[in-house]
Amino acid sequence: MEQKFPLPPFNVETAKQKVQLAEDAWNSQDPVKVSMAYTVDSEWRNRSVFVNGREEIVQFLTAKWEKELDYKLKKELWAFSNNRIAVRFEYEFRNDQDELFRAYGNENWEFDENGLMQKRYASINDVPIKESERRL
């Protein structure tokens, strides 16, 4: 049985650990590595895109990081209870026209008993920025 520690129910320490592990994985820009934190039938809503299962997660993230260059992400714990965690995040990237953006958003996560994320719902907004406005 696959397990991704820490396991629910979460406390403040384990919830923060889970958030940091997610941030580290996403900053690796390795779609397969990221997908392994999710159940094989995980459900996502990412903006207006619906993704189901690890195979679609890998496809989605591969396409994402082909378009979002110089990607850098920061996540922050917002709230947690039992097997759920809410985070706020921001990330910066450059597109293929050399335009910079910062994306702001919130995610709601739900985990199974083995610590794998079974649901991820993300709301995200992009804001164009200048090089002098970069923070990450």
Image: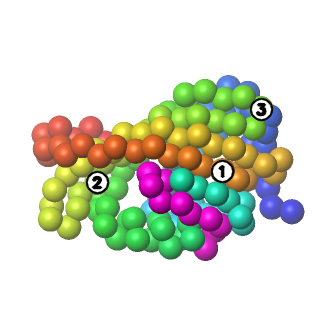
Residue shown at 55% from the left, 31% from the top: 77
Labels in figure, total: 3
Find out whether residue 35 is within the magenta segment: no
Q: Amino acid at mark 1?
A: Lys
Find out whether residue 50 is within the magenta segment: yes
**Local crowd at mark 1 within 10 Å, few (<14), some, or many (≥20)?**
many
In the current view of this chain or complex, which residue is farthest to the right?
1
**Local crowd at mark 2 within 10 Å, few (<14), some, or many (≥20)?**
many
Q: Amino acid at mark 3?
A: Asn
Residue 132: x %, y % from top left: 13, 40
Q: Nearer the viewer, mark 1 or mark 3?
A: 1
Location of the N terminus (image quadrant): bottom right
Q: CA distance from mark 2 to mark 1?
A: 25 Å
At numbered mark 3, what does the secondary structure look like: helix, strand or loop?
loop
Q: CA distance from mark 2 to mark 3?
A: 33 Å
Q: Nearer the viewer, mark 2 or mark 1?
A: 1
Q: Earlier in the sequence, mark 1 or mark 3?
A: 3
Residue 58: x %, y % from top left: 54, 70
Q: Is residue 130 visible?
A: yes
Q: Is residue 20 visible?
A: no
Residue shown at 59% from the left, 40% from the top: 108
Q: Which stretch appears magenta?
A: 46-55
Mark drawn on residue 119? 1
**Residue on which the image places disc 2:** 93
Q: Earlier in the sequence, mark 2 or mark 1?
A: 2
